[in-house]
Image (cartoon, rainbow, N blue to C red):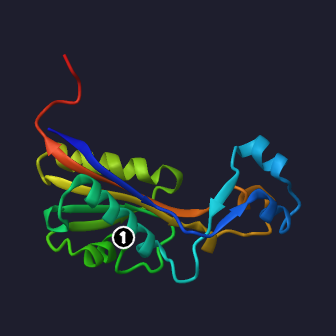
Amino acid sequence: MTGKICGTGSWAPLKVWDNNDLARMVDTSDEWIRERTGVVQRHIAEENEDTVTMASRAAQRALEDADIKAEEIDLIIVATISPTEIMPCVACRVQEKLGAEKATCFDLNGACTGSLLALNTAQAYLSQGIYQTALVIGAEKLSALTDWTDRGTCILFGDGAGAVVLKAEESGRYAR
């Protein structure tokens, strides 16, 4: 048994800072940032846009893309290092917003590899037949944690969320 991706969704804040915006804040330039990172712009959440809001919006889009109802989800995993609060976790708050009442929910903290950690964790649960339909979300509001005076790190981070819906299916992972 394996989890097949049957829907995806994403959400990013409307506010965008480009490299020139950062150059007005720290000693840097568009050229310096592009050469070292390839980053041209980053999305920055407003005060009222928290990790839960972004995760929920991406999740709703993934559910729509998969053409399934929230009630069908039995596992929600959110990868984040920027929750608004520790408890309840982001996944539980997303569950409430979506109405996914029967879903088991938890957050994982894997930093840069968080989404992959969450995806692999969901795959493990699906492959064992423990759950049938999983919602995996990576969501960050790193703008709230970033030191905007540190040229070495502020050039890297922004805000947003991505989500996938996985459904268990019998076919194996490897074709023979």
**Near-viewer residue (80 or 61):** 61
- When asked about the image quadrant of residue 56, the answer is bottom left
Which residue is at 48% across, 78% downward? 84
How far across and down, in percent of the image, does residue 69 sit? 17, 64
Residue 147 as seen in the image, left or right of residue 110: right
Which residue is at 14% across, 32% downward? 171
**Near-viewer residue (114 or 166):** 166
How far across and down, in percent of the image, does residue 1 sit? 14, 38
Q: Residues within 10 Å of mark 1 (few under 14, many from 20)?
A: many
How far across and down, in percent of the image, does residue 98 sit? 26, 73
The residue indicated by pointer 1 is 56
- 18 lies above or below 147: above
How far across and down, in percent of the image, does residue 9 sit? 37, 56
Which residue is at 42% across, 75% downward? 53
Image quadrant occupied by the C terminus: top left
The residue furthest right is 27
Q: Is residue 157 visible?
A: no
The residue furthest bottom is 48
Count of numbered marks: 1
Residue 119 as seen in the image, left or right of residue 54: left
Residue type, numbered disc 1:
Ser
Q: Is residue 71 visible?
A: yes
- 91 lies above or below 35: below
**Near-viewer residue (35 or 69):** 69
Which residue is at 27% across, 60% downward? 64
- Element carrying mark 1: helix
Residue 74 as seen in the image, left or right of residue 20: left
